[in-house]
Amino acid sequence: MAVTEKKLGASGVLYTDRRDFYVDPQVTKELWTDVAPFTTLISNQETRDVPDPIFKMFEHRNPWVKQEFSINKGTPGTIPNSDVGLGSLPIDGIVGLASTADSSYIGLQVEVWNSAKTTKKGTAVISAVTSGSLTMKSTKGATIVLADDDVCMVIGNARGEGSSSPEAWADELSVVWNSCQIFKTPLQVTGTLEAAVLRGESNELARLRRMKAQEHKIQKEKAFLFGTRVDGTNLSGSSDSFADGGRTDADGNLIRSTYGIIPAIDDYGTSSGDDQNIFSIKEDEYEYADFVDDMEKVFQYVPESGSKRAFVGAGALGYWSKLQTGNNLAGQSGWTVNIGDMKRDSLGFNYRTLETPHGMLQLIPTPSLRGPYNKYMVVVSDDNLFHAQYRPMVYQANIKTDNAFDGVKDQYMSDEGVGIQLIESHKLFKITAS
């Protein structure tokens, strides 16, 4: 029987060339649009033009926040309930005072606690200092039985009537540093491809420019989050030496790199004590008391707004979200957290708000926190973090012209880094399975 009609087929020229399967042939969907919230935030918060690829910053910790020392004597004795006092008391563990006991200690009034700071033994005043050892008198009307490693916390100073001005002491500023690093992200097409009429994206050069701009930005984001530098930052106080060092490339050129916020906290922070800024959470063992204690340390340097920003991986955001529902061990133990709906910041990134007893945390999903960093949360202090810029990002067009090159090669180039100060003001949470 002869074929009387032509049908839409699955083979031949009609299928391979004439049928148009593209709903919107000039539009391509991208998986990520907001790729670098950390870089976006610090760039909009504060960008500083630094005078050199390696840059220094001053920082200072007010000594009056915590002033204490410890008794450093095997059998120190008893401070009597009299005006005699107890002498020959060497000390160590000095915080917020002159680094060696001198005349500036005379007149300081202290509370004496056991080494664990769980039992107060009494109050005393320092009446004399001889060769770095103290003489102390009880001011409570009772004896004070001292032990090695007892902690003496300064609560004031008490001077005698008609006495002269006491000896003064002063501390010094600290210096920390970091580097900018050179980022280069190239793109290249042939002249033939540039002139082609295409589906999906009509202009391949324009598509690559957009894609490479995002690649340049997310590589900066990862460097600002995860990067390290050979010569450190001195954020621990005095362990690093300032140098313009690094590694070299194949041509012997110096490669500088910036120290990112996560390794900075990891390498210079502490996982215990009053200034703890590294927190390890085991999912099925975390209790409400732990949550309250941790958030107290997060907000101990309270911002005026009562809110802090926290950059989170999807796993960390999921962990806090699960705590809200109560469908987990924590919820079954009778506690949950309050977490707000997803909102969009004026800078273009999404966030949710976690309520804590001490302040509000703005949880910002961060695409770069993936893989081993999926359950990380980085809480930053805006005042102690900035975007350092030695040379701003530029788009360098048509950089390859030798021998009448038939094509276009462009690149994005920048020389940037991150400035980090007062490392204890930044916090890092690592959430792991039990």
Image: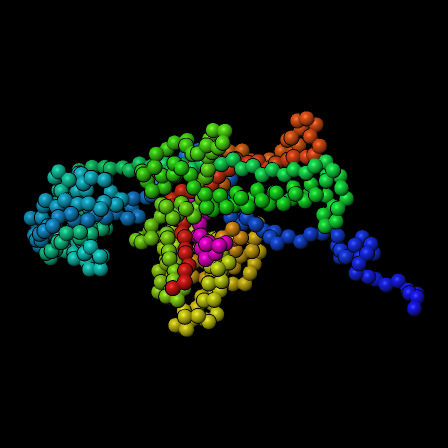
Image point 58% across, 39% down: which residue? 185
> Is 132 or 416 nearer to us in this picture?
416
Report whether residue 157 is seen.
Answer: no
Extreme residue in the top direction: 403
Report whether residue 331 is seen.
Answer: yes
The vertical placement of 216 against 346, above or below, is above
- The picture places residue 342, in percent across and down from the top left corner, at 55, 60
353 part of magenta stretch: no
Image point 93% across, 66% down: which residue? 2
Looking at the rendering, the stretch of residues picked out in magenta corresponds to 370-386
Image point 49% across, 53% down: which residue? 369
Q: In the picture, residue 15 is in which quadrant?
A: bottom right
> Is 104 or 350 nearer to us in this picture?
350
The vertical placement of 180 against 81, above or below, is above
> Is 208 or 287 nearer to us in this picture?
208
Quadrant including the N terminus: bottom right
As drawn, is 68 to the left or to the right of 176? left
The vertical placement of 295 against 125, above or below, is below
Q: What's the image's color scheme?
A: rainbow
Image point 46% across, 46% down: which residue? 226
